[in-house]
Image (cartoon, helix red, strand yellow):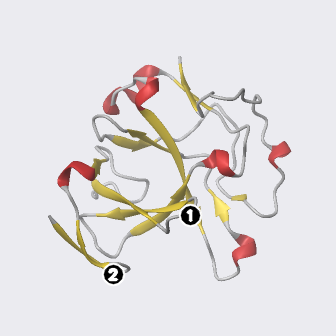
Amino acid sequence: MQIETTRFGTLDVDESQLFNFPMGLLGFSGLKQYVVIDHSEDSPLKWLQSVDDGSLAFIITDPLFFVPGYRVSARRSELEIIGADEEQLVLSVIMTIPENPQDMSANLMAPLIFNMVNRQAMQHVLTKQKFPVKYYVLKDSPSIIESPSMEHGDKAISLR
């Protein structure tokens, strides 16, 4: 299928690569389908491009890239809408990159959770964990995040 976008022009996307957000994203509840596009081959950043609105795209990344101890705990029932098998889930956060890159921030309070098998995804607002909406990637110290340290091989999301 072809998608007309503002940033990337016409994209030829295989429908099997689409992610469905049944509840949309905060502020964009009517936009349900997105595709993830690599920013560049060696960049940790990716684009979450709306299929429904070609002018809407978010920069996303793995939060462990800049906050090694970041860990999200969620109830299985909270993630039921996308399928709650921990091994199939991948966590990302939305980035904001203003004109001055030193002010780049990540929304750690409302991460995106992707089920890589069934291609369902959601934005999960953390109400019990104290993470900032604006975590300044180049200014804030990871030590301000009160989160358990992770052992090698641990995932950033755990279900209870």
- In the image, residue 134 above or below residue 145: below
Q: Position of residue 86 (x, y in %)?
A: 46, 25
Q: Residue furthest top?
A: 160
| Residue where numbered disc 1 is placed | 42
Type of amino acid under label 1? Asp
- In the image, residue 76 above or below residue 104: above
Q: Position of residue 33 (x, y in %)?
A: 26, 55
Please give left or right for residue 63 compared with residue 46 in the image: right
Look at 36% across and 38% down and name the residue there.
116
Classify residue 87 by image quadrant.
top left
Element type where label 1 sits in the image: loop
Classify residue 140 by image quadrant.
bottom right
Q: Nearer the viewer, residue 62 or 139?
A: 62
Please give left or right for residue 101 compared with residue 159 in the image: right
Type of amino acid under label 2? Thr
Q: Nearer the viewer, residue 26 or 104?
A: 104
Look at 50% across and 69% down and name the residue there.
40
Q: Position of residue 141 (x, y in %)?
A: 84, 52
Of tags 2 and 1, the one toward the viewer is 1
Q: Nearer the viewer, residue 103 or 77?
A: 103
| Residue where numbered disc 2 is placed | 6
